[in-house]
Image: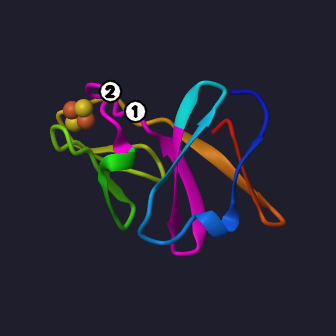
């Protein structure tokens, strides 16, 4: 991904919900963590399941398929079977727009 792209309106991202967007062929999940918007890859690094269907608990996102848990803010693997960190992305808020760019 090069540069920042507008992906959503800030009002579309609410606490406790995951919003899936696509940017340049990459599927990215947006979430509101305590008022801060974060962005991470939708594709679990274990076997490519969709994390947008997983469960976010605080900063932890759990994959529905085999139970891997990642830190959604940093991408760190907290629980396997995944061993590869989850890609995360930089987020900018400009007015009412949410933009996502390279980490
Ligand atoms: S695909 Fe996510 S834990 Fe296996």
* Residue 40 appears in the rendering: yes
Q: In which quarter of the image is ligand 1?
A: top left
Q: Which of marks 2 and 1 is nearer the N terminus?
A: 1
Query: Horizontal and vertical percent for residue 73?
Result: 48, 53
Q: Is mark 2 on a helix, strand or loop?
A: loop
Query: Horizontal and vertical percent for residue 5?
Result: 76, 40
* Residue 82 appears in the rendering: no
Determine if the C-beta at disc 2 is less than 8 A from ligand 1.
yes
Residue with the mark numbered 1: 43
Q: What element carries label 1?
A: loop
Residue with the mark numbered 2: 48
Location of residue 101 (image quadrant):
top right
Residue at 63%, 39% in the rendered image: 103
Residue at 27%, 28% in the rendered image: 46
Q: What stretch is highlighted in magenta?
A: 28-51
Q: Is residue 22 left or right of residue 77?
A: right
Pointer 2 with pointer 1, Cβ within 8 A: yes
Residue at 32%, 27% in the rendered image: 48
Q: Examine the structure image and report whether residue 103 is included in the region drawn in magenta.
A: no
How far apart marks 2 and 1 lie (CA) works out to 5 Å
Query: Horizontal and vertical percent for residue 1?
Result: 68, 27
* Coloring scheme used: rainbow
Q: Which residue sits furthest right?
A: 95
Query: Horizontal and vertical percent for residue 23?
Result: 65, 33
Q: How crowded is mark 1: few (under 14 residues within 10 Å), some or many (20 or more)?
A: some
Q: Residues within 10 Å of mark 2 (few under 14, many from 20)?
A: few
Q: Examine the structure image and report whether residue 39 is included in the region drawn in magenta.
A: yes
Q: In this view, does 27 lie to the left or right of 8?
A: left
């Amino acid at each position: 991904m090069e540069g920042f792209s507008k992906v959503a309106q800030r009002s579309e991202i609410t606490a406790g919900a995951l919003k899936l967007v696509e940017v340049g062929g990459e599927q990215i999940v947006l979430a509101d963590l305590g008022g801060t918007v974060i962005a991470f890859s939708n594709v679990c690094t274990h076997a490519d399941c969709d994390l947008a269907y997983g469960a976010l608990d605080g900063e932890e996102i759990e994959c529905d398929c085999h139970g891997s848990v990642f830190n959604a803010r940093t991408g760190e693997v907290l629980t396997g079977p995944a061993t590869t960190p989850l890609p995360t992305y930089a987020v900018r808020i400009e007015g009412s727009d949410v933009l996502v760019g390279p980490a």
